[in-house]
Image (cartoon, rainbow, N blue to C red):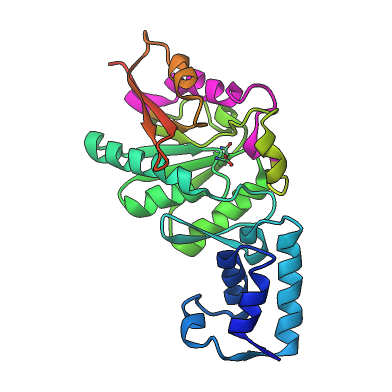
């Protein structure tokens, strides 16, 4: 037998302190705050054995959200499992940008392409109950997770299966299209650390701009008049993504920075 305090102290030498608490809270089905007032509680050998198994998975590199099956995004819990990208705090920049724009232009319909866990589509729908939200993904695994999240969190979303615009019929148009596509360059050294996540959600396998290009190029066929497109991208892709927007077709093209002061979201509006 050992106390919560002793166990957390010992584990902090092996994995991140915060993650150690997340894993123990998951195991004990309690909130992390519980440990503050119960740090002298003893853990049974059975709990310790199960905790050790979770720590070992984390030590082997598995991301905590896959181990506990959940990641918070925009203050809501999203279910995640292998085969679906784990929501990132960076993507909250896309949410904030789009929310401000919805208010400004009174958009009524929105499409989130490559929705993954559904975190963008579901958050936007819940923050704007009058917005009619659709979401697509080429991965059936991801669509299933997104549908489960929509149901659990109470969001009404129309889902479409297919790669980018192939998921849609030719006549479908939206006031806004948003996306967090795979944009990591296939040679980027950071990819190695992300091996548990679906590679197709991380990189296009070409130059990191291929899918961003596909989305910009096809958007005019699926946006309403003066429709708006916003996409997340890498910190070093701002200029390259702005260049994808043909000035004959688009106006108000600009890049927004994330909280870390990196270029993160580029948006544009179809000319009238
Ligand atoms: N932002 C993610 C990362 O850098 C990548 C997700 C993406 O390519 N859309 O880990």
Read off the magenta span. 199-228
Q: Quadrant of ligand 1?
A: top right
Q: Is residue 21 magenta?
A: no
* In-front residue for pair 24/253: 24
Residue at position x 61%, y 47% from top? 85
* In-front residue for pair 157/199: 199
Horizontal and vertical percent for residue 173? 41, 29
Quadrant, the N terminus: bottom right
Horizontal and vertical percent for residue 227? 34, 26
Residue at position x 57%, y 62% from top? 70
Q: Is residue 224 visible?
A: yes
Q: In the rendered image, which quarter is residue 222 located in?
A: top left
253 displayed left or right of 73:
left
Horizontal and vertical percent for residue 212? 53, 25
* In-front residue for pair 179/135: 179
62 displayed left or right of 96:
right
Q: Vertically, is 11 above or below 239?
A: below
234 displayed left or right of 94:
right
Q: Vertically, is 236 above or below 46?
A: above
Residue at position x 72%, y 40% from top? 192
State how many labels appear.
0
Q: Is residue 138 visible?
A: no
């Amino acid at each position: 037998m050992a106390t919560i305090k002793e166990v957390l102290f010992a584990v902090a030498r092996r994995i991140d302190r915060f993650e150690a608490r997340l894993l123990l809270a998951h195991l004990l089905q309690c909130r992390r705050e519980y440990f503050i007032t119960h740090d002298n509680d003893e853990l049974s050998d059975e709990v310790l054995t199960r905790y050790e198994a979770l720590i070992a998975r984390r030590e082997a590199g598995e991301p905590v959200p896959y181990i506990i099956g959940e990641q918070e995004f925009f203050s809501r819990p999203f279910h995640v499992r292998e085969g679906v990208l784990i929501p990132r705090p960076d993507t909250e920049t896309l949410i904030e940008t789009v929310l401000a724009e919805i208010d400004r232009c009174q958009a009524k319909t929105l499409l989130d392409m490559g929705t993954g866990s559904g975190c963008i589509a579901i958050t936007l729908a819940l923050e704007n109950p009058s917005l009619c939200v659709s979401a697509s993904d080429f991965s059936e695994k991801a669509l299933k997770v997104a549908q489960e999240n929509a149901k659990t969190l109470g969001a009404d979303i129309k889902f479409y299966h297919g790669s980018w615009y192939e998921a849609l019929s030719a006549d479908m148009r939206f006031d806004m299209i948003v996306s967090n596509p795979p944009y990591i360059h296939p040679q980027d050294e950071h990819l190695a650390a992300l091996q548990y996540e679906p590679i197709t959600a991380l990189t296009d396998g070409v130059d990191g701009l291929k899918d961003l290009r596909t989305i910009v190029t096809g958007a005019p066929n699926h946006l309403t008049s003066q429709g708006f497109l916003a996409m997340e991208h890498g910190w070093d892709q701002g200029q390259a993504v702005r260049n994808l927007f043909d000035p004959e077709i688009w106006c108000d093209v600009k890049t927004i920075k994330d909280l870390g002061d990196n270029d993160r979201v580029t948006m544009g509006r179809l000319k009238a």
